[in-house]
Amino acid sequence: MNRPDLLDQLARATQERAQRGLHRRLRAVEHTASGRCRLDGHEFIVFCSNDYLGLAAHPDVIAALQRAAAEHGVGSTGAHLISGHHRAHAELEETLAVWTGRERALLFSTGIMANLGVMQALLGRTDTRQPGLCLQDKLNHASLIDGARATAATLRRYPHADVDAAARQLAAHPNDAALLATDGVFSMDGDIAPLRALAALCRRESATLMVDDAHGLGVLGPQGAGSLADAGLTQDDAPILMGTLGKALGTGGAFVAGSAALIDGLVQFARSFVYTTAPPPALAAATLEAVRIARAADDRRERLRHLIERFRNGAAQLGLPLMPSTTPIQPLLLGDAERASAAATALEQAGFLVGAIRPPTVPDGQARLRITLSAAHRDDDVDRLLDALAALPRKTQADPASDSC
């Protein structure tokens, strides 16, 4: 028998990725503080985290975690539907629902599990339901795309933020139940989806709108309630909201919020909710405190806006090819993957951690530095980063002839 060896195939694929300059590696951070970390014995200013409000090391959040761990232990001991759903989980779900203007919310262990669960519940085939159509922005997060691919639904992807193209694709499937899913804030580009136009399209075409607001929650809208609140859209306009807790809130996990019928349906059919251990109740308690702080954190959001403006103004003076983003995600397009890696390495040598984002996370020819800002940064941190960007070796700078610049 001449059956191919799966591990050998995986090793060859890994080697091929390394030869293309796309190899990924794990690095263990030794210590973190607001906007800073220690790695390999060196101190760095961090411009690659998603801790947008600087809450991950907030003393009140830490204290809430410690108190709850002392009272409830460090594990939930079971799945939500068995013995793992603690009062802290229920209180957090109630608070998240109120904050986002939804009837109910349901906790998931991660964002990818939340998106998988929604897709499974809505688009999975049952005795009484056909899987229908899932329409998605081409730049959606991988978890939305993978979630749809894990169902029997027809997946169609429209060009980024192109509402007219989305309308044509919906019109081509007039008899299918349809879910239109989009990021609220796009994680690699930092721009905001045309949510009002998408909501109007879904109303007109009787489609259901789902928004993954992982990078908008805590940052945008009144009380930081997210991109939908910022756009003035309600549960009726966007029936399904997914939010993560490990970015602006600084803890971990995710949730889906919407109608009572949606949440009850997810409890029945979302396999990534049913068949997993619930997150630790102490983490839920810490997140409750983080939500309390975030809702009142207009000063932190104003600080963040100030830093974004400061960085963009400085980048414009240097002629740096930033993408058009008003959020804490500020991508600097470099085009070539090796150029992006070299730039990240040069910045690290200067004391800054900045993520080099390369294919397949972004399309070929669109490698970039994904620079992220936090309310924990100081003005001087931003100014020093700009100086370091200006001092990058010529070979790591953007190619003026590239389409990406």
Image: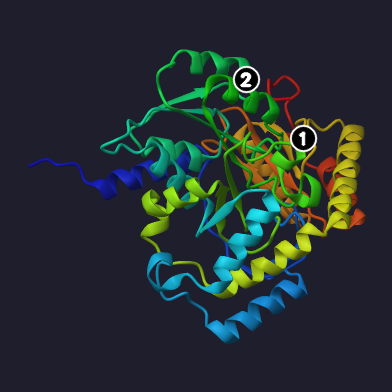
Question: Which element type, helix, strand or loop, lies under badge 1?
Answer: loop
Q: Residues within 10 Å of mark 1 (few under 14, many from 20)?
A: some
Residue 370: image location, x then y, percent: 69, 43
User: In the depicted view, which residue is nearer to us: 353 or 101?
Assistant: 101
> Which label sits on residue 109?
none
Q: Classify residue 132 by image quadrant.
A: top left
Which residue type does callout 1 highlight? Ser
User: In the depicted view, which residue is nearer to us: 123 or 261?
Assistant: 261
Q: Classify residue 342 by image quadrant.
A: top right
Residue 135: image location, x then y, percent: 49, 27
- Earlier sequence position, callout 2 versus callout 1: 2
Q: Residue at x 71, y 45 (%)?
A: 226
Mark 2–mark 1 CB contact (< 8 Å) = no
User: In the depicted view, which residue is nearer to us: 75 or 397?
Assistant: 75
Residue 207: image location, x then y, percent: 52, 27
Q: Residue furthest bottom?
A: 70
Q: State the residue position of label 1.
A: 325
Task: For the C terminus, give its image quadrant.
Answer: top right
Disc 2 to disc 1, C-alpha distance: 19 Å
Q: Is residue 359 visible?
A: yes
Q: State the residue position of label 2.
A: 163
Q: Residue at x 58, y 19 (%)?
A: 204
Which residue type does callout 2 highlight? Val
Compared to 117, does 64 lie above or below?
Answer: below
Question: Which element type, helix, strand or loop, lies under badge 2?
Answer: helix
Numbered circles on residues, count:
2
User: In the depicted view, which residue is nearer to us: 149 or 85?
Assistant: 85
Q: Residue at x 81, y 43 (%)?
A: 389
Query: Does residue 374 appear left or right of residue 238 in this picture?
Result: right
Q: Is residue 384 visible?
A: no
Q: Residues within 10 Å of mark 2 (few under 14, many from 20)?
A: some
